[in-house]
Amino acid sequence: MEAGSAGHVLDFDDTYVPGLAHLSAPTAPAALVLGAALGASMGEVLDAYADGFEAMGALARSSHPALYERGWHPTAVCGAVGAAIAAARLLGHSGDEVAGRAARLALVQAGGLRRAFGSDAKSIQVGAAAAAGVIAARLAERGVTATADLATGPGGFEQAFGGSWAEPDSRPAVAENWIKAYPCCLQTHSPIEAAQRARQRVGGELGQAASIVVNVHPRARQAAPYDAVSDGLQAKFSIPYTVAYTLLHGPPVELSAFDAVDREAEALSAAHIDVRLDDSLAETAARLELDGDELALVEAATGSPARPMTDAQLAAKVERLAGARLGGVLEGSARDALAASGLG
């Protein structure tokens, strides 16, 4: 659970937009921690992680936007299943009855609420999903049963959660995955880049009478619901705040940008920035207007499949997060990698 929570606590993990879920956050820690306990190689861990990643992606995609609309946190709900499939693979079960039971046993532990966004509870429920998946796989290996139609039958997953059960198919989730460029809610990223384009156009001079409107899809507002913010964690989930911060200081690239609330950005956000909903925009798009004139439209921010980060940008992100500690970990054992991460 600790590793799963740590993987999500900065909100700097990858995001699968077709399912609006962070596929690595619960599956990678589950694979790494269990792999270390079993003495697995990093190659075996990566194979298990890939299985869990794709299983979680298929379920999140088929259940979107139903889970979101009902207030569920898709990463936490679908992550339990992804972690179970990853753990089952490490225990020697892939695509068999044991793996199927592991997925169903994970479903009975699934949970996590969207209302937790902007608090520590968000990362805790992702950590719980990772732990639930490992527990489910261990139980399944020992013969513990779960109703065969638990996912689709009366009173099962689909009826209770509103999602749609699915297993991996020919559409690889990894090909549509988004790597975040900023350590905050993905739905603030296009607003951030729209603000940066506007800043470059107006030279940072907004004027006290400026009326700044950020147009986003309603789903973006569900993910980033805060206007007034009380701490740096809520600020990560505020479209007006992150736009104000960018207009004043540039994009919040460094982790330290959210150590505390920037009072100048807070004041600008409160006085001059409004968020409006436009369901004609894509879920991750943003349009910024200044005094009624469109200054910027961002349909896909940096890190999206349409605008992927460069190798240099990806390397810089890893360096920013881990320094040199992860150098060579893929060539060693899972135990070595877990130790290098600081969680072993």
Image (cartoon, rainbow, N blue to C red):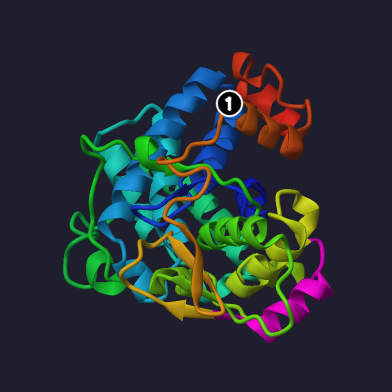
Other-residue count near label 1 (Cα within 10 Å), few / some / many at <14 / 14–19 / ≥20? few
Q: Which residue is drawn at 60% across and 36% down?
A: 33
List x then y, in percent, for residue 224.
54, 71
Residue 137 appears in the figure: no
List x then y, in percent, for residue 312.
64, 27
Q: In which quarter of the image is residue 194?
A: bottom right
Secondary-structure class at tag 1: helix
Using the image as rendered, state which of residue 63 and residue 272 is in the foreground: 272
Q: What stretch is highlighted in magenta?
A: 259-274
Residue 269 shown in magenta: yes
Where 308 sits versus 224, above or below?
above
Say whether residue 79 is left or right of residue 207: left
Q: Is the magenta stretch mostly helix, strand or loop?
A: helix
Where 28 sits versus 5, above or below?
above
Say whether residue 165 is left or right of residue 305: left
List x then y, in percent, for residue 205.
74, 68
Where 64 sits versus 27, above or below?
below
List x then y, in percent, for residue 57.
35, 46
**Residue at mark 1:** 311
Q: Which residue is drawn at 18% across and 61% down?
A: 152
Q: How many marks?
A: 1
Residue 335 appears in the figure: yes
Q: Quadrant of residue 69?
A: bottom left
Q: Residue at x 52, y 49 (%)?
A: 130
Q: Which residue is drawn at 37% across and 41% down?
A: 176
Say whether residue 160 is left or right of residue 241: left
Say whether residue 243 is left or right of residue 298: right
Q: What residue type is labelled 1?
A: Asp
Residue 116 shown in magenta: no
Q: In which quarter of the image is residue 118?
A: bottom right
Locate the C terminus and report the quarter of the image it occupies: top right
